């Protein structure tokens, strides 16, 4: 099984990248005022949460509890709150909409087809996210250039027409190794599933470990065509940070 958090390569310019990321976050607060970060509780989120809580605490942080998250993700949330002595707002789906979905499609209806899966993601992730960002001027993402060809084109500051917010991308130049270097160096809390072959962690029934050499998102919605594996928060043409939710 792949150990995705194995000892990372030496990255001597990490300090400079940390400083640049902090600068961007602080500038975003000065420029845009109300800034929000939706944490996926993944590896990039560990870094961003640390930078925000330590250096740009004016940025509000929330997460979406879909109701189907792994227990280790919820335990991680509690560990983060203990470490930083700060409460993270947890946003939930609308109960009636979840009940209606389950009545129509069954408790695991997302396995029945793409439309059913996307409907579940919309109810449990997209709508709560859209509700949570109302009133903000900018949102922070954990997008990195090396994640995909589309993400290689992303700029540090961009207008996000989908949500009508400024998008702030402080980790663009960070490599996967640097993310894990920083997590190790700062002893940041992270999800133990990363050590069990889960590079990308979402809802429990829709996430599984990947094999060595597989794409990092191969374990997400693995029964679908690779092109459809997005949750609706971040379609491929508009990349962002919380598709890990
Ligand atoms: S990842 Fe799976 S369980 Fe979670 S919201 Fe999407 S379809 Fe539903």
Image (cartoon, rainbow, N blue to C red):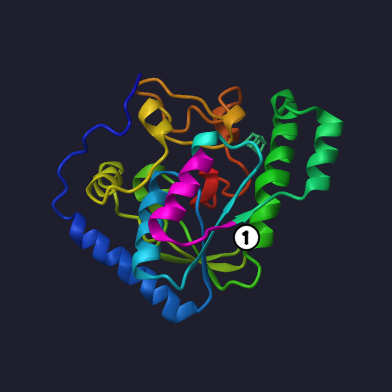
What residue sits 60% from the left and 34% below the top?
A: 228
Q: How many marks?
A: 1
Query: What residue is at 45 percent from the left and 24 percent from the top?
Result: 209
Vertical placement of 213 versus 232: above or below?
Answer: above
Q: Is residue 195 above or below residue 187?
A: above
Where in the figure is residue 233, as x and y percent of width and height?
Answer: 60, 49
Q: Quadrant of the N terminus?
A: top left
Q: From which residue to which does the magenta span run?
A: 73-89
Where 239 sits versus 220, above or below? below
Q: Position of residue 172 (x, y in %)?
A: 35, 55
Q: In which image quadrant can residue 91 be found? A: bottom right
Locate ligand 1 by image quadrant. top right
Could you tell whether 100 is left or right of 48 in the image?
A: right
Residue 36 image point, x, y percent? 52, 66
Query: Please, is residue 54 above or below residue 114 in the view?
Result: below
Which residue is at 53% across, 31% downward?
220
Would you identify the image quadrant in which residue 223 lies?
top right
- Quadrant assignment for the C terminus: top right
Residue 21 within the magenta-colored segment of the rendering: no
Where is residue 135 shown, x and y percent of the image? 64, 73
Residue 142, visible in the rendered structure: no
Label 1 sits on a secondary structure element that is loop
**Left or right of 222: which side holds 125?**
right
The answer to which of 112 and 65 lies nearer the viewer is 65
Q: Is residue 205 visible?
A: yes
Q: Residue at x 40, y 34 (%)?
A: 192
Magenta segment, principal secondary structure? helix
Q: Which residue is mark 1?
A: 162
């Amino acid at each position: 099984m792949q150990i995705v958090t194995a000892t990372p390569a030496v990255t001597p310019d990490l300090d400079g990248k940390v400083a640049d990321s902090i600068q961007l976050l602080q500038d975003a607060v000065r420029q845009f005022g109300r800034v929000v970060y939706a944490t996926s509780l993944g590896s990039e989120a560990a870094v961003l949460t640390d930078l925000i809580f330590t250096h740009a605490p004016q940025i509000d942080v929330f997460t979406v509890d879909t109701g189907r998250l792994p227990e280790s993700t919820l335990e991680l949330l509690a560990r983060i709150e203990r470490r930083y002595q700060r409460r993270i707002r947890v946003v939930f789906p609308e109960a009636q909409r979840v009940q209606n979905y389950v009545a129509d499609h069954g408790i695991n209806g997302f396995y029945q087809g793409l439309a059913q899966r996307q409907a579940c993601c919309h109810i449990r992730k997209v709508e709560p996210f859209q509700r949570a960002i109302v009133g903000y001027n900018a949102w922070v993402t954990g997008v990195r250039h090396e994640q995909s060809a589309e993400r290689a084109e992303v700029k540090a500051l961009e207008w996000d027409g989908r949500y009508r917010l400024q998008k702030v991308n402080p980790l663009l130049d960070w490599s996967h190794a640097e993310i894990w270097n920083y997590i190790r160096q700062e002893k940041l809390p992270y999800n133990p599933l990363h050590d069990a072959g889960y590079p990308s962690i979402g809802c429990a029934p829709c996430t599984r470990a990947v094999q060595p050499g597989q794409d990092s998102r191969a374990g997400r919605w693995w029964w679908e065509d690779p092109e459809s594996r997005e949750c609706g928060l971040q379609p491929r043409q508009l990349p962002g940070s919380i598709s890990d939710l």
